[in-house]
Image (cartoon, helix red, strand yellow):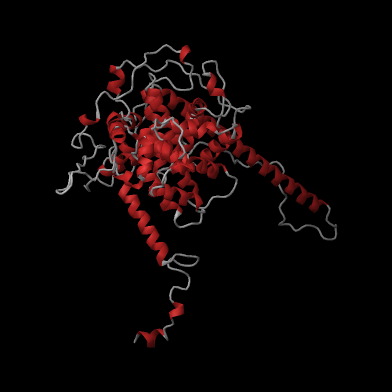
Amino acid sequence: DSEDRGGTFNESDEQPTGIHGPGCECTPESALCVQFLRLLHNFCDRDCDNYDGRRLLLSKDERRCIFENPIATEYDISQLSPGLLSKIIIAFIGESDESPYRFWLASCVESYLRGSSPPEQVFVARTGLLEHLIDDITSQRLHCAGSLQTSFDLLGELCKGNTEVLRRLVRNLDEERFRKLMSVAAANLVDSNVFIRSVILSLERISSSNGLLPLHLDSEMFSSSRGKWRSANGVFSRSYLTHSWWDTCAVNMPSVDSTETNDESNDSERQCDIVRPSDWFPTIGSIEACKMEPPETIETQSVGLHDGVGHFGWIFTPEGDSLSPATHAPNTVERLSWFLAANQTRLLRDLLGVVDLRNINHENICCLNTAVVIAIFAHRRRQLHVLLQDLKRMNAEEREHKRRAVNAAAAAKEDDVIDRAFVQAMKYMALDLENPPARYARRASLTRRSSLSFTANSGTELGDRNDVMRNFREVLWFWMEYYTHRGRDRLSLEFSSHLRFQEWMEVVSLLGADDGSPTSLVPSPLPLPRSPYQRAA
């Protein structure tokens, strides 16, 4: 019956354009490869700090070399027998942007790095992956959809919390490449904000171990207590019942007919895991107990157009007497620390410029999380109110600039209308007397001006990005509704930042107090949507 209704069946007509439609080049073999990569991704992806199952992707030579050599020691990776992880990295470097495997190859490496130890991060960076990612981001070519985000996400996970990888990142960056990397990041915040957040978290960890003194400041010019930021508790004090980021530890029992175990780890690897300090940020109580005081005043460069200002208003040239000498060089971590500190307000403004209550989704909510991270560390330095004042002032200056630009454009448009009206009137005057103009022909007015001008709308609509403070408050409402009802997402947020969710909530509550306080975004409560979790009356 189906043949009678649809005509004769021809095997050549089956999927003539590929499995997924026109242009699809997928084959059963490629689908099998993707499924295998997804399996590896799920095998390595664990929200815990002590999962050593991922190390099965390393060869015995690689495991021995990684944990027996100090992080700063140079060793030749090419002489080691490659494991599955190394083969995945080599395949990723060789794939083009259009490859259907590139994303999944990067996901496997990223899931391996998430929660791995610092020596493992350094090993992956030495495989050539770090240089490849920097070259890919700073290249002049056009990137396919998602390609730039893949590179930025992998680069962020590679250098998160690792000083050695950060130094390798900036080591080969001259002034031009440094500006190029940061300009690409500033122009594509939806793609790069996870990388920027990782760098901020890494620099703040270094700062926390130095008495909350930023890395780019000259320590001799600031007198503050130097508290040690190292966990005093060993790994045996952490349990999966009391620490959400600590998994159960597997115990390898010897077989009945053999005294050997299946554990491939060596003594150096086990010792490295035991002495590995906690890289979670100290709580506010720990900071107060260690008497770590942030510097009272930090110089900030004035906002305006000068030689140090590049694209999007970001400042690239460091100036100031309180900066350390290494800050003035492009290939130093101190320069990177200064750049993010000097452009902190601009970064926050731009992050809030790509997300609002009307378009927020799973793709750009990470921009909001990065904005909250900036607010958290400003609060730790007791400068949250200063950050909000700068953001409010910058927003007011931009609105005034837009108002003048709109009025200037309107005036230019009116002048053009007047010029055309004048020409039309002269045509009427030059008409032959034998053909006078019709009585209904109206004379163009040469003096009338339209009332086109930029006026502030007192009744700002929901999701208006022109008012940054209001927009920030509105998307924080969504943030509260989203994370307070999703325990698994809270755990992922806590694990990715190594900041307790309680501190996230504390800072978000300060920003959303709506009481006009210095740390509140708006002076009074706003009309916000009804919670989707609220019961109907």
Looking at the rendering, which quadrant does residue 251 occupy?
top left
Residue 85 vertical position relative to residue 480 in the rendered view, above or below: below
Relative to 519, is 160 above or below?
A: below
Query: Can I make out residue 486 in this image?
Result: no
Q: What residue is drawn where x is 48% and y is 19%?
A: 217
Looking at the image, can residue 257 be seen?
yes
* Viewer-nearest residue: 371 or 152: 152
Compared with 411, 41 (above or below) is below
Total residue callouts: 0
Q: Is residue 42 above or below residue 303?
A: below
Q: Nearer the viewer, residue 392 or 170?
A: 170
Residue at position x 56%, y 36% in the image: 312
Q: Residue at x 36, y 44 (%)?
A: 112
Given residues 530 and 222, the one toward you in this image is 222
Quarter of the image with the N terminus is: bottom left
Report whether 345 appears left or right of 5.
right
**Residue 33: % across, % down:** 39, 59
Pick whichever, 394 or 59, lies toward us: 59
Q: Position of residue 164 (x, y in %)?
A: 44, 31
Name the residue at the left extreme: 256
Residue 388: give x, y in percent of width and height: 43, 27
Quadrant of the rendered image containing residue 37: bottom left
Rendering coords of residue 245 (x, y %): 26, 37
